[in-house]
Image: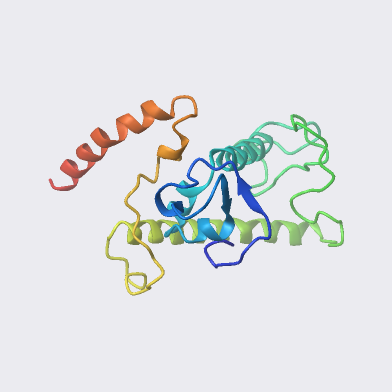
């Protein structure tokens, strides 16, 4: 999001597998700046432009947060599918299974906000609705980037077209990672099947 809005970071991503290739042909050596990634095009093209190490860090962080949120924690709430509070997330400071100590929580990290239980419940419901609205918006942009007619988004110049596979989180620049090469080999046949089914 930051890169897509052309907000530069003062530091560089080094060791990127795409340095000197594709949209980064003019980038010398092994250094890719955040501004170079912002110039890659649509948001998913920017994801493809990230070095493998950056992708693995992002996916690893998401995995850890999901793991903590979905596993029972000592003294915590039951899972929301088993009678727990929808939208509740356990404290990171007290969670089990965190690879290293975390000094802050996701919500109210410094403890400045005081809320009653009713305010917390309302906030959780608001956040769930925000998430639903965000998912609708994301799928609208995904559809528009594939050339589908989406009222309100078709005329926006910034909605770039993306020719890749959204459900394939790795691209040819990540071929050095385990199993990625075989995944990439399966994409063309899959794309042909999807195109044939779309024409029926």
Q: Along the line of sight, which residue is nearer the eye, 118 or 38?
A: 38
Q: Along the line of sight, which residue is nearer the eye, 121 or 110?
A: 110
Which image quadrant: the N terminus? Answer: bottom right
Quadrant for residue 11, please give it.
bottom right
Q: Along the line of sight, which residue is nearer the eye, 119 or 164?
A: 164
Extreme left residue here?
A: 200
Indicate the position of residue 109 as horizontal and vertical percent values.
81, 54
Left or right of residue 19, residue 184 in this image: left
Extreme front residue here?
A: 28
Indicate the position of residue 61 as horizontal and vertical percent values.
65, 40
Up/down of 125 relative to 158, above or below: above
Q: Which residue is at 14% across, 48% downward?
A: 199
Q: Which residue is at 78% across, 43% downward?
A: 91
Residue 170 visible within the image: no
Q: Which residue is at 40% across, 38% downward?
A: 172
Q: Which residue is at 39% across, 61% downward?
A: 140
Residue 153 visible within the image: yes
Left or right of residue 189, residue 62 in this image: right
Which image quadrant: the C terminus? Answer: top left
């Amino acid at each position: 999001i930051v890169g897509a809005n052309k907000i530069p970071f003062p530091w560089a991503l080094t060791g990127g597998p795409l340095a000197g290739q594709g949209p980064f042909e003019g980038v010398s050596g092994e250094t890719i700046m955040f501004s170079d990634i912002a110039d890659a095009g649509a948001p998913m093209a920017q994801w493809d432009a990230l070095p493998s190490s950056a992708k693995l860090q992002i996916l690893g962080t998401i995995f850890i947060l999901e793991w903590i949120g979905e596993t029972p924690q000592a003294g915590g709430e039951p899972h929301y599918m088993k009678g727990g509070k929808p939208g509740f997330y356990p404290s990171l400071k007290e969670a089990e299974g965190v690879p290293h100590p975390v000094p802050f929580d996701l919500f109210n990290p410094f403890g400045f906000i005081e809320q009653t239980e009713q305010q917390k419940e309302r906030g959780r419901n608001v956040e769930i609705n925000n998430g639903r609205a965000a998912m609708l918006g994301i799928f609208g942009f995904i559809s528009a980037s594939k050339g589908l007619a989406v009222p309100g988004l078709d005329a926006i110049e910034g909605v770039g077209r993306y020719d890749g596979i959204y459900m394939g989180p790795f691209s040819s620049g990540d071929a050095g990672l385990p199993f990625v090469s075989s995944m990439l080999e399966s994409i063309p046949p899959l794309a042909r099947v999807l195109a044939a089914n779309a024409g029926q």
